[in-house]
Image (cartoon, rainbow, N blue to C red):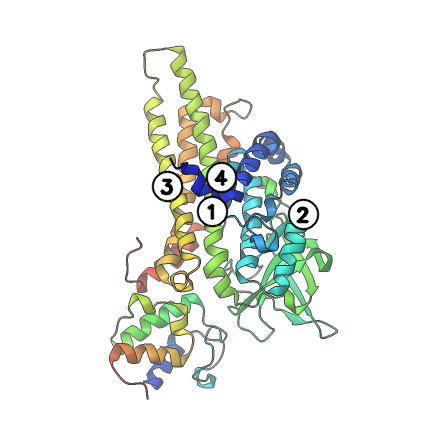
């Protein structure tokens, strides 16, 4: 799951740094994720994982780190967090 | 029998007194100066001084810091009252309160000291510098950055701001900048820059169609200060929870004031027509009824937004969610569009008397001011942002 998250992040996140240099718990907003890019990140993740983020997950916190994205996706896909 | 007003006064005791002060100042100082302020594009000094004397600059500061602890609805009502007399004065007051709201809601012990000593104690006027030359108008990105001071124990900040409303008259300016020189453009902080540690070099003039009294030229800012002047929370959160929604909320009340002024001119015009021919409905009377319906819609829209903001303001979950952001964004688009429509309708009702600049029914200033509404943070940009958010938001916006 992490590779796919990182791939979508690389495609949609428009970060100031290489995604490979970002730790799982690094703040993506500090790495340059804008609110505009975070919308595209959400759409990209929905497509890649064939899920829909419910309204309560559509907030800044959900997309703050790779870990928080993984947690949200695990909840939606029913895949346990490793 | 329960006195209905009594229970309300317990909650908003301060607010009613302040609204009464604002009404008094609006009628005796703000209104009489409005034409002059507009013609000369000058700062409404007497209006701001009168508000200082009545301590209206600190109404949003909590009572524990010496302020009145007014609610956003109460401040919005003051803005509307001022807006009926002079949109520039109302906009300056609104912008000041937006900055105060940011400090109150996202401050620290040191910021509290500033609120108590300067905003309450000296009735300091606060301005804002969020736009920057060369970033394409997106206030959520900065090019300039907070840097370590020469002695290593504070910050320095240089910013090329294309617009700072009443910057020359402000006692402090809240400036956005990247957190540090290594930060990406979107990783911003908000910095309280105080007059004595601030150098402003004007880069342009301010000769506009409307809002002429806001005196909003560009400046090169050079500021320094202690690290405690940097608000602790990321600007992204301050913007989402306070700066953006409170801006749209209070600006909308400025426009509601403009609309109210135009409606009252049209209303009095039609009543005068009716007096000339008792028993017949003046031709413009139907148009007046339609105009009043539009005004009521705008009033409902803006007051609902004030209530929406107040009920959400303690709940960071609601405020961080998309439906709230979309609602507060689109409020700005709707209200700024409606105000132009309302003033235009009022002008059609009054005819040439409103079109003339030298008549008692002139609506020229109101129309020019109204057209500024759609441009300050352009509606197209806001619609674009809202459209993006609607792509992922799934719930309605009730």
For the residues tagged 3 and 4, is the chain the same? Answer: yes
For this rendering, which residue is in front, B38 or A79? A79
Which label lies toward us, 3 or 1? 1
Q: Are discs 4 and 2 located on one and the same chain?
A: yes
Q: Nearer the viewer, mark 2 or mark 3?
A: 3
- The residues tagged by marks 1 and 2 sit, at their Cα atoms, a distance apart of 34 Å
Question: Is B124 placed left or right of B320 in the picture?
Answer: right
Left or right of B356 on screen, residue B207 = right
Residue B165 in the figure: left or right of residue A35: right
**Image mark for residue B169:** 2
Q: What is the total number of numbered labels drawn onto the structure image?
A: 4
Residue B300 — which label?
Answer: 3
Residue at image location 37% in from the left, 36% down from the top? B296
Q: Residues under labels 4 and 2: Cα distance?
A: 22 Å
Question: Where does label 1 land, which residue?
Answer: B11
Work out whether mark 3 precedes mark 4 in sequence or the reverse, and give the earlier one: 4
């Amino acid at each position: 799951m992490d590779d796919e998250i990182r791939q979508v992040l690389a495609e949609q996140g428009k970060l100031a740094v290489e995604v490979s240099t970002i730790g799982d718990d690094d703040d993506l907003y500090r790495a340059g994720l804008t609110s505009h890019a975070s919308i595209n990140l959400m759409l990209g993740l929905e497509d890649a994982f064939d899920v829909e983020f419910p309204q309560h997950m559509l907030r800044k916190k959900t997309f703050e780190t790779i870990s928080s994205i993984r947690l949200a996706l695990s909840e939606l896909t029913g895949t346990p967090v490793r | 029998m329960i006195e209905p007003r009594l229970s309300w006064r317990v909650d908003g005791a301060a607010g009613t007194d302040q609204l009464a002060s604002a009404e008094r100042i609006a009628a005796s100082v703000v209104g009489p100066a409005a034409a002059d302020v507009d013609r000369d594009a000058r700062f409404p000094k007497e209006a701001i001084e009168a508000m200082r004397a009545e301590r209206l600059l600190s109404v949003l500061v909590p009572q524990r810091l010496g302020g009145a602890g007014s609610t956003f609805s109460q401040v919005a009502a003051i803005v509307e009252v001022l807006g009926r007399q002079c949109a520039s004065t109302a906009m300056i007051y609104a912008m000041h309160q937006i900055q105060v709201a940011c400090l109150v809601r996202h401050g620290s012990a040191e910021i509290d000291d500033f609120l108590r000593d300067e905003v309450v104690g000296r009735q300091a006027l606060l301005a804002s510098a969020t736009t920057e030359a060369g970033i394409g108008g997106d206030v959520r990105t900065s090019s300039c950055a907070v840097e370590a001071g020469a002695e290593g124990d504070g910050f320095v900040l240089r910013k090329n701001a294309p617009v700072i409303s009443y910057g020359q008259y402000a006692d402090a300016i809240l400036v956005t900048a990247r957190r540090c020189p290594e930060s990406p453009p979107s990783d911003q902080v908000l910095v309280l820059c105080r007059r004595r540690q601030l150098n402003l070099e004007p880069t342009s003039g301010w000769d506009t169609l409307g809002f002429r009294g806001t005196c909003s030229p560009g400046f090169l800012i050079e500021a320094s200060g202690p690290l405690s002047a940097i608000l602790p929370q990321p600007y992204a959160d301050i913007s989402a929870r306070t700066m953006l929604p409170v801006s749209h909320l209070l600006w909308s009340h400025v426009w509601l004031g403009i609309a109210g002024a135009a409606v009252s001119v049209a209303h009095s015009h039609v009543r005068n027509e009716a007096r000339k021919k008792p028993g017949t409905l003046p031709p413009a009377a139907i148009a007046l009824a339609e105009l009043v319906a539009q005004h009521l819609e705008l009033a409902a829209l803006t007051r609902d937004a004030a209530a929406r903001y107040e009920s959400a303001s303690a709940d960071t979950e609601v405020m961080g969610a998309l439906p709230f952001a979309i609602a507060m964004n689109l409020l700005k688009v709707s209200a700024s569009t409606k105000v132009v429509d309302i003033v235009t309708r009022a002008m059609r009702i009054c005819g040439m008397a409103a079109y003339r600049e030298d008549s008692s029914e002139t609506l020229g200033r109101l129309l020019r001011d109204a057209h500024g509404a759609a441009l300050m943070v352009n509606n197209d940009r806001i619609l674009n942002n809202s459209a993006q958010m609607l792509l992922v938001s799934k719930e309605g916006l009730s």
